[in-house]
Image (cartoon, helix red, strand yellow):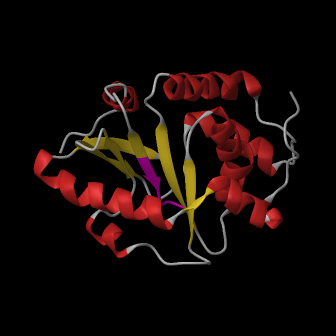
Amino acid sequence: MSLLTADQLGEVLERTRRDLFRIETLPSYDTAMTTGDFRRWLDGETEPTWEVRQPWLDTLAKWARDGRPRRRVRVIHDPPSDYEQYACDWGYRYNVAAGEPTRVLDLAEQGLPEELDAAPGDWWLIDDGEVVTMHYHSDGQFRGAEVLDFQDVAAYRVAADAAWRAAELFNSWWDRHPQHHRTPTRTA
């Protein structure tokens, strides 16, 4: 199996015309975009590196304005990993404000919808018609991505719908879990 590189994955995701769904299930990820800020968050810094973060937020806002928002469901483990708390604190709360609808499946409060058994792991669903599965090393480092055959799409579409329905809006979940907050809201 030949896996797509991060750049190739980006090209595939750019094909989105109306809806891009992502499910994240790992307790942590090791990516170039987050590694520096994650270390800074662990060290007690109070804000992400805006020179890195802001272009991403601008991209999310543009996609939302163009009518092709990225939707995300984030599985939060029990207890949440440091990375999950960081991703909520310095990631999702800003992504949501930029226009990325994000929801949370908190494993401390509920199990995963059974429909996810047929569509395990991390993946993207592009325009309800194309699935890209994500492959990671055990430490969360990206190995590559794989575009699945069209015949596999139906189970992922059902799983995406079930996960979206079962998950709680990020802002609602975040407001109910101040114990995970570390950073005050960014002022304009």
Q: Is residue 136 above or below residue 178?
A: above
Which region is colored magenta? 22-28
The picture quadrant where one finds residue 119 is bottom left
- Please state, as top left, top right, bottom left or bottom right, where the N terminus lies in the image: top left
Residue 53: give x, y in percent of width and height: 68, 29
Residue at 19% over, 56% down: 154
The picture quadrant where one finds residue 152 is bottom left
Q: Is residue 165 above or below residue 131?
A: below
Residue 121: give x, y in percent of width and height: 37, 60
Q: Is residue 49 left or right of residue 116?
A: right
- In depth, the one of 4 and 169 nearer the eye is 169
Residue at 66% over, 67% down: 80
- In depth, the one of 64 and 117 nearer the eye is 64
Residue at 82% over, 57% down: 181
Q: How many marks?
A: 0
Q: Is residue 39 left or right of residue 126?
A: right
Residue 172: give x, y in percent of width and height: 69, 59
- In depth, the one of 162 and 105 nearer the eye is 162
- In depth, the one of 164 and 34 nearer the eye is 164
Residue at 42% over, 53% down: 137
